[in-house]
Every structure is written in C-alpha cells, then in structure tokens.
Image (cartoon, helix red, strand yellow):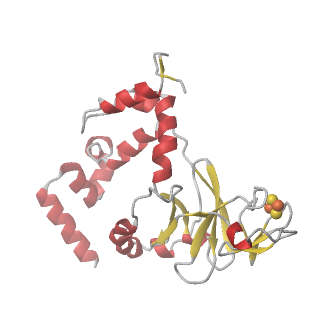
Amino acid sequence: MQAYTSNSQPIDRSETVRLIDRQRPDWSLEQAFYAAPAIFALERDLWFPRQWMLVAHASEVPEKGRYIVRQLFDEEIIVVRFDDGEEDIAAYYNVCTHRGSRLCAKDGRGKLLVCPYHAWSFRLTGELQSRQDLPESVDPEALGLHRVPCKHFGGLVFCGLDANSLPDIQPVADGLTGGLRENGLDRARIVARKNYLTKANWKLVLENFLECYHCRPAHPEYYRVNGHVKVTATRDADKAVEWQNEIEAWH
Ligand code: FES
Ligand SMILES: [Fe+2]
C-alpha cells in the first residue's frame, strides 16, 4: 500500500510503523497522522473495528419485530428488537447466509427477516427458520445470521465489529447509565437528524471535542452559562464546588 503526505512523498506501512514508534507520549501527533491515507487505512483495519460505536437510539426499534439498517464503517448491519424486554436488541450483518444477498433493503418490521433472493427466512433472534432445498448433510443450525456485538444502555445502542478485541463496555455502561436516565435520554425520541460533513481527519474533530481548554476564549457565552464548562476549562477548585452545589440543587 502507498500513501502520500501533503508534500506528495509516498509513505508505506513500514514508514507508518516508524512514525508510530517515534511518537512522543503526550505530544501532538505528527502531520502524517492527520493527512496520510496509509495511516487512515491502518486505522480502518486495526482501530475502528475494535471500537464500540453509537449506532442507534433504542426508540428507533421501539417494539418486537422492528428493525433498522445501519452502516458501521465498511459493513452494513441490521439492528433488531427481537423481544419486548428492555435488553432485547441484537445486531446482525445484513448478509444472507445462503448466497450472501443483502437481507434487508431498508428499515422495517416483521416476524421474520426474509431474504429477497431465494426467500430463506430468519428468526428475529438470528436462527434460520425456513430454507429451500437445503441438502440433508448441511446443518441448518450452522446457518444463522452472523451476529454483530451489540450493547444497549440508557437508550443508546452500541455495536462493534471485532468481537475478539472490543473492550469491555460494561464499566462505561455502569458509569453513564445513571446520568443518561437522569437527563431523559432513555425516554427520548429522534425528531430530526442533521449531518455535518467536516473536511478534516476524524481525530481533529475528536481531539477538539475531548478538550475544553479552548472553551473560555473560543466560546465565551457557552463558558458563562455552563458550570461544567467552567470547571473543565479552568480546573478551578472553587468553580468545581459551585458546580457541585448547582447539581445538588437540581436534585
Ligand atoms: S441468498 Fe438469501 S435466500 Fe438465497
Ligand atoms: Fe469548541
């Protein structure tokens, strides 16, 4: 694989490894981490599949039989409510286990997921239900839909691709569920959706989001009205006490 830095010098995988090796901990990343397609390709192969991603809100699959089709990096997945319990949401690759046809073309509802090609059908829990002309030597149990790891808490549905290397999401769920419920996220509904296309590497967007050092000079109004922002922007102990008091007053 070859890629190009902004001065048009190609870099290959071994150069990418050298770049990673010489990265100084806690220092900004070198330019190539934001601009070189070889690094982006490496992230797609190695990093993205090992991350839990927010793919849906639970209200998008409000009752048994409802399913939605979503893109997760280079894969298309189906997120389905297979029963009425709070936890009963699963995700599958949107690929029929017969000849690989796309199973669901769009969001929908049904008692089964039926393939449009030869009409094999799958239960909402993923097992193969009915199939045409399956040779006796083939075990139908082995032909269920391929599951995508899926976890749901506080109204948010997360999926990840690489089941063997996804981190344990339970500590995150334990830490966030209370706050999500307190803010009504579990009872929320989606009324509008806006996409903002940013012509920048994804890490620039995340890095900006994860620091609030810039909030005071860059967003003075936001800084003035939001106690949490005041604390994270200044790390001022008095402001932290004020903010804590404000939270307790709400309760
Ligand atoms: S590809 Fe789905 S039933 Fe044949
Ligand atoms: Fe900002």
Instruction: State the residue in front, 232 or 50.
Output: 50
Relative image position of residue 86 (x, y in whole percent): 52, 81
Write the residue at 51% across / 30% down. Answer: 37
Where residue 196 appears, as percent x and y from the top left, is: 54, 45
Which residue is rendered at x = 28% and y = 76% of the image?
250
Q: Quadrant of residue 24?
A: top left
Residue drawn at 86 percent across, 69 percent down: 132
Report the quarter where the N terminus lies. top right
Q: Is residue 194 visible?
A: yes
In this rendering, position of residue 17 left or right of residue 10 = left
For residue 29, which quarter of the picture? Answer: top left
Q: How many marks?
A: 0
176 relative position to 246: left or right: right
Which residue is painted at 47% across and 44% down in the image?
46
Q: Is residue 110 visible?
A: no
12 in relation to 45, above or below? above
**Ligand 1 appears in which quadrant?**
bottom right
Q: Position of residue 223 (x, y in %)?
A: 28, 51
Residue at the extreme front: 137
As drawn, is 167 to the left or to the right of 124? Answer: left
Percent position (x, y) of residue 240? 17, 61
